[in-house]
């Protein structure tokens, strides 16, 4: 990640956000929990059943999991849209070029011709063809303001965020609380399964309750802390 800061892909505040993620990953045992597995299945179900799914990619997501996100985009037929918190034309080009090089896919984002209502100028910028028209949006490592604005705009939001208490996780329809490099291949595998099984996808989605799942994750963290260090 430090090397990615030097290349201009990751911002310095992105590096701090990465540290927040690592802290929660320790508390979760640095492994995909049963709650995360359930959320990954529900996320894949939502993506598989969507009319116009979109996957947003910021600097951290690009640096950590560009290839995995490309595989998921192929598996669920969603375009990748680059969306930066700290935006400049130069950084936008850098991140778009990087993601296109890693995935072999053309990304949206260079020509932002729309705005998402309810947030401050630069962060509101998006594309009409992508985010603005989407019914389901996967937002890895996103900030709470933007997540809430997407929900207000009527989008079904899937987050990938290791903090079960973040505003993003709380606002999402499906919050995947797992490290991005584990979460994305997990979602991709479920998408491949649901391609020929839409009824199963509908069942998985109907059985998923985000609030309950986050509650169960918090209990898991508390139990781990009460038990003390592993022997
Ligand atoms: P809020 O959603 O309340 O605004 P925040 O201020 O922490 O939370 P950001 O810093 O923009 O929002 O979000 C980044 C989020 O991504 C953090 O919650 C962090 O825990 C999470 N995160 C960082 N690195 C990873 C990672 N590798 N995998 C999954 N999640 C990560």
Image (tube, rainbow, N blue to C red):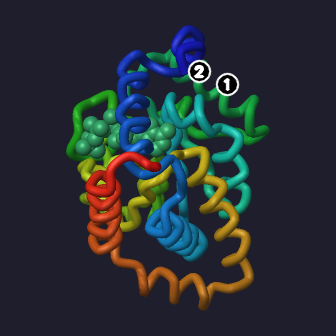
Q: Nearer the viewer, residue 31 or 162?
A: 31
Q: Secondary structure at mark 2?
A: helix
| Disc 1 crowd, CA 10 A, few/some/many (<14, 14-19, 20+) | some
Q: Horizontal and vertical percent for residue 95?
A: 58, 25
- Examine the rendered structure and indicate whether residue 195 appears above or below residue 8: below
Judge: label 2 CB < 8 Å from ligand 1: no
* Residue contact at pointers 1 and 2, CB within 8 angstroms: yes
- Examine the rendered structure and indicate whether residue 205 appears above or below residue 189: below
What residue is shown at x 36% (from left), y 21% (from top)? 13
Q: Horizontal and vertical percent for residue 162?
A: 40, 47
Q: Which mark is residue 93?
A: 2
Q: Which mark is residue 97?
A: 1
- Examine the rendered structure and indicate whether residue 112 appears above or below residue 228: above
Q: Which mark is residue 163?
A: none
**Count of labels in the image:** 2
Q: Nearer the viewer, residue 180 or 203?
A: 180
Which quadrant of the frame does ligand 1 lie within? Answer: top left
Q: Horizontal and vertical percent for residue 45?
A: 55, 74
What residue is shown at x 48% (from left), y 55% (from top)? 138
| Disc 2 crowd, CA 10 A, few/some/many (<14, 14-19, 20+) | some
What residue is shown at x 67% (from left), y 61% (from top)? 188
Q: Horizontal and vertical percent for residue 131?
A: 46, 50
Left or right relative to 38: residue 185:
right
Q: Is residue 3 visible?
A: yes
Q: Please identify the quadrant where the N terminus is shown.
A: top right
Q: Secondary structure at mark 1?
A: helix
> Which residue is farthest top?
6
């Amino acid at each position: 990640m430090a090397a990615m800061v030097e290349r201009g892909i990751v911002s310095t505040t992105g590096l701090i956000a990465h540290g927040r993620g690592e802290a929660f990953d320790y508390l979760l045992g640095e492994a995909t929990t049963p709650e995360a597995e359930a959320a990954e299945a529900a996320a894949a179900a939502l993506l598989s059943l969507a009319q116009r799914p979109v996957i947003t990619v910021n600097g951290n997501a690009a640096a950590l999991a560009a290839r995995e996100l490309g595989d998921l985009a192929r598996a669920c037929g969603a375009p990748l849209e680059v969306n930066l918190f700290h935006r400049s034309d130069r950084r936008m080009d850098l991140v778009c070029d990087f993601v296109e090089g890693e995935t072999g896919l053309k990304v949206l984002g260079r020509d932002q011709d729309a705005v998402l209502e309810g947030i401050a100028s630069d962060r509101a910028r998006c594309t009409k063809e992508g985010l603005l028209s989407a019914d389901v949006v996967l937002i890895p490592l996103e900030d709470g303001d933007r997540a809430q604005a997407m929900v207000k705009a009527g989008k079904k939001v899937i987050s990938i965020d290791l903090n079960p208490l973040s505003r993003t996780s709380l606002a999402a329809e499906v919050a995947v609380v797992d490290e991005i490099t584990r979460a994305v291949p997990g979602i991709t595998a479920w998408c491949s399964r649901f391609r020929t099984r839409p009824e199963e996808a509908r069942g998985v989605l109907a059985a998923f309750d985000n609030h309950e799942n986050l509650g169960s994750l918090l209990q898991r963290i508390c139990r781990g802390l009460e038990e003390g260090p592993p022997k």
